[in-house]
Amino acid sequence: MQDVRILVHTKGSLGDPHVAKAATRAVKTARIAGFKAVEAIESITEAKRRLKLPATDPQKVDVVVSAYNTQRLLAVASDLDPLLLRDPETGKIEPLPVPLTAILPSMNERYPFVLSDAGAQLNPKPYQVYVSALLAGNLYKVVMGKQNPYHRFGLLSIGEEWVKLPPRLQAVGELLQAKEKRVVKPAEPKDVYKGDFVEVLVPMDGREGNLFLKTSEGVSEAVAKVTKSEYRHGPTSALLGLLSTPVHNRVRRRFHHDETHGAYFLGTKHFLVKHHGRSNADALYLAIERAARHARNNVIGQVWALTLQELEQLHPELLPT
């Protein structure tokens, strides 16, 4: 993994000093672990420049990891050779609004699920949401090693009935159903975390995806804080809390956002990772380690190839040529 070149952006949203400290510590940890080609950088503009350099340039990097503002990182991602698509209504060739794709834990640790957009696309067209869902499904396939081509896609909904989906999301579902045997169904938030319900969760846009993600984080943190406070009610509760510490640590590793290790801006040929601004240095190091492994395995290239293959087979009208 030493040959993967990584830049860790040290500037967070609103100049949060915590991000710079966590990034600096994570880089040191990575170097100790054997990642010799990892370095910290303050300028996201310089990071983008180095990401776009040709492979033969000695300053070229393979991955940029950042906790910067999502919309500012989206502007960077949109300038990193995004996927070009033909609008089926106008015939115009347009870049795909780059989604922010996150792999999230479920109750079954062997079966996480992918949120196709956690906060990037604000007003996408149905065909753009469809392509983002394909990218997310193929990320799941490549990363999890699941070769089943008929992953279950859940359309984020307020009910189980198809009619409760907004018209735009119904149109996305119809595009996804073009692949024979693929399961596409409305998905209520309460069902998604079961681990055996869907592999890909598709919101109508990044705003809804981000609301789902932030609500999940908020509930997780609230439950953790309430549980911790209850263990302080007397010596018996304190003793039980001490004895159950290993269990709580295992639960935290499975569900806490610090352990999700960053989200990917899919839809661009370059590897740009956003990590949570509140992540500590250990969580950021895990994001670096995972990104390095995925870069070495050409995960982005594999995801693009699988996505283009399906588009060529089922929806060639969306491709520029």
Image (cartoon, grey):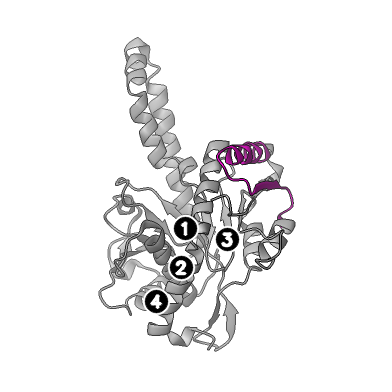
Residue 54 picture location, percent across and down? 68, 68
Residue shown at 71% from the left, 55% from the top: 44
Answer few, some or many: residues within 10 Å of disc 3's Cα (few below 14, many 20 plus, some between 14 and 19). many
236 horizontally vs 224: left or right: left
Label 3, label 2: how many angstroms apart (C-alpha)?
12 Å
Residue assigned mark 1: 209
Relative to 142, is 311 above or below? below
Q: Is tag 3's residue or tag 2's residue first in the polypeptide sequence?
A: 3
223 horizontally vs 285: left or right: left
Label 4, label 2: how many angstroms apart (C-alpha)?
23 Å
Q: Magenta part of the protein: which range?
A: 18-44
Which amino acid lies under the numbered mark 4 shown in the image of this protein? Ala
Residue 118 seen in render? no
Residue assigned mark 3: 271
Please name whichever residue, 202 or 48, is drawn nearer the observer in this view of the structure: 48
Q: How many marks?
A: 4
Residue assigned mark 2: 303
**Callout in the foreground (3, 1):** 3
Residue 63 picture quarter:
bottom right
**Callout in the foreground (2, 1):** 2
Q: Is tag 3's residue or tag 1's residue first in the polypeptide sequence?
A: 1
Answer few, some or many: residues within 10 Å of disc 1's Cα (few below 14, many 20 plus, some between 14 and 19). many
Label 4, label 3: how many angstroms apart (C-alpha)?
30 Å
Relative to 86, is 25 above or below? above
What kind of element bears circle 1?
Answer: helix
Residue 18 picture location, percent across and down? 65, 37
